Amino acid sequence: MKPLLALATGLLASTVSAADWPETTLDWTLRAQAEARSANPDSALAPAAQILGAGRDCGAGEVRLRGRVGQVGFAGQAWAASCDPSGVDRDGRVDELFWEGEAGPQHFTLGKKVVSWDVGFAFRPLDVVQRENRRALIDQQLEGVPVVMLEHFSSRLASTLVFANPGQSDQALRRDEQALAWRGFAQTTAADLHLLARWGAQERASLGAGFSAVPLDSLELHGSTRWGQRATRLVGTWPSNQPLATASPWQDEVGGAFWQALIGAQWTGENKVSVLAEAWYDGTAPSESEWDAWHARNATISAFAYAPDIARAGNLAWNAQALGQVNLHRANLLLRAAYGGDTWQPEVDWLYTPADGGSVLSAALAWQGDRLRIEAGARSYLGPTGSLYRQLPDRGNAYLMMTLPF
Amino acid sequence: MFDFSYVHRGLLLAALAFGASTAHAESPEALLKRADTWRLSAEHMKAETRIEVMRNGALEKERDYLVFLRPGRESLVLMQSPAEKGQKVLMKGDDFWMFLPGSQRPIRITPTQKLIGDAAAGDVATLSWSEDYSPSQAVAEKCETVACTHLTLIAKQASVTYARIELWVDTKSAQPLKADLYVVSEKLAKRARFEVGTVSGKPQVTSMIIDDEILTTRRTVLHYRSRTAYEAPEAWFNPMYLTRNAVTP
């Protein structure tokens, strides 16, 4: 990694042209939201509902800033949030702070920046730098990753080399992992092509490719796949001869090879109605046998009558960590329909996991005025009681949000 | 005695006929190119556009756009209004991409997705008819007090915003007067008329009033606020470049 840093430093010191860059900008947005959640009494984790905050209603107000001063770009947010019955949490975050420059055909970025890759919507195998957790009901402003980035662009080709998390510990995992990633892009007559190569301090080698094509005026097709030498997985290691653990049994472990793949299609009619269908496979998600062990462990904890309730609830709460993963099952399907009206914008989507028949149904309706945007939505977890989505601590949630940009 | 007045009249009629035939000698393609100059003042251009969306005669929304154009049907539209700030649409011939600041990645979109939004991206970014359309017929007509030519324009590519445009231009000056815009399904989507003012001492189209024929209560007024010659760097027209801040004015 040291030669890359030296190269970056040398290039940064060279002459940088900013003659064509327009002036400084500052945009800010006020947002207020209320969220109501209903606890799931059918979940095996229900005894831990209080610890997990299940069914807790929340309200939040936040201000978001985005802008640039010369060659420095920035984005950040500050918020005050309160979840019943706890007090008010006030905090803030710098989401992006980076410098952009160029020297001849080379373009550089240095700092904390959002670097999102891939062609998919519900899942993105090639999103190896940002690693955005998709499918959140309420959209969040993304937090960038520390990067040193070198890019080259022609009319139809692009090459991006990213050194992510420089200076980070070699032991850091997931989006904090120190890694070198390259993305190539080619615009051909048939499709946009994306190629990916990555070397991570922990996950080692990874290769991927993707495409996006428009074969008809109303139809877009896309797909991507990635193979990795080693995967970071959340693994539960329970004590073999004790029903209860004394510390969380869940931790990240770097294991064997994996692959991920996504295929999708989006149709949009002249009437502004669009339908998206995506299917994907994620080899880093837990296997069926791992989920069988998880169900069995929950049953063991609940049945162990010799421990106080708080100890059993604590163990069940630890087991809820497994439900926070990007994909709960390896095979997944998403269908989405939306109407892109000028004022009213309804949408509905349905995520289905064939392995256990569980699904997530989400619906939202937005009203867009000249500036003010009001949005309301709801999400419900459906399927057999034993399915993973029906084991989530919440049965569903609903929100109301107002956004006012300046 | 020979009456020279008949000769005089004959010569006059011949001259008028010659003049008329000269006027009609201009090909529809050439007339269309002349009509383009009323909106497109340079090959490489930067244009600031404001859209006013009216419903039942009342102003509902205002949207500002900054458009970079270059030959080869390439344009980059930057949304400037608070509600859309940071969004970008790149059009390169028949290929289109959109960049949303929330996801921070360029996504490929279809021609029909271009129609979504307060203003069809094609309405904002397309300043040249002759690059996108072929005139299939030209008919001399009378438009109120002026002699005009009714051009039927057929899309050269399926990816353009409108499959067919019926355009009326002043036969003498080629000033665009009005247009009927049809989508692929042959449905009349919009009716437009053009207003002319003086820009840099030269008569130019300064606004386009578009009546929605599907949502009949809706009218869009597109104002060309500025048009200047500007050669944007080639890199700006690469979809992957949309993530860089340098494209944000």
Image: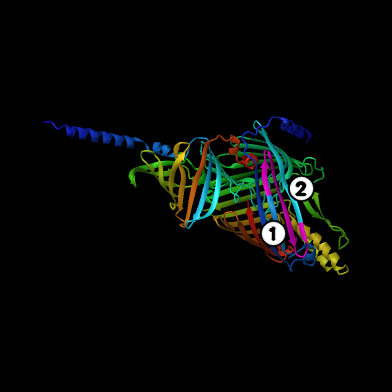
Q: Residue furthest left?
A: B1
For the point 52% across and 49% down, the residue is B51
Per the rendered image, the range of residues in magenta is A65-89
Disc 1 designates what residue? Answer: A355
Mark 1 packing: few (<14 Cα in 10 Å), some, or many (20+)? few
Residue at the spot of label 2? A174
Residue A132: percent from left, percent from top: 70, 50
Mark 2 residue element: helix
Kind of residue sitting beneath label 2: Arg
Image quarter in which the N terminus of chain A is found: top right
Q: Is residue A8 above or below residue A215?
A: above
Residue type of the residue flagged with mark 1: Ala
Q: Nearer the viewer, residue A49 or A13?
A: A13
- Residue beneath the point at 67% across and 51% down: A123
Circle 2 crowding by C-alpha within 10 Å: few under 14, some 14–19, many from 20: some
Q: Is residue A223 magenta?
A: no
Query: Disc 1 or 2, which lies upstream in sequence?
Result: 2
Q: Give me the chain letter of mark 1.
A: A
| Residue B183 rendering spot, x and y as whole percentages | 46, 50
Mark 1 touches mark 2? (CB < 8 Å): no
Residue A288 visible in image: no
Q: CA distance from mark 1 to mark 2?
A: 26 Å
* In this picture, residue B223 sits left or right of residue B97: left
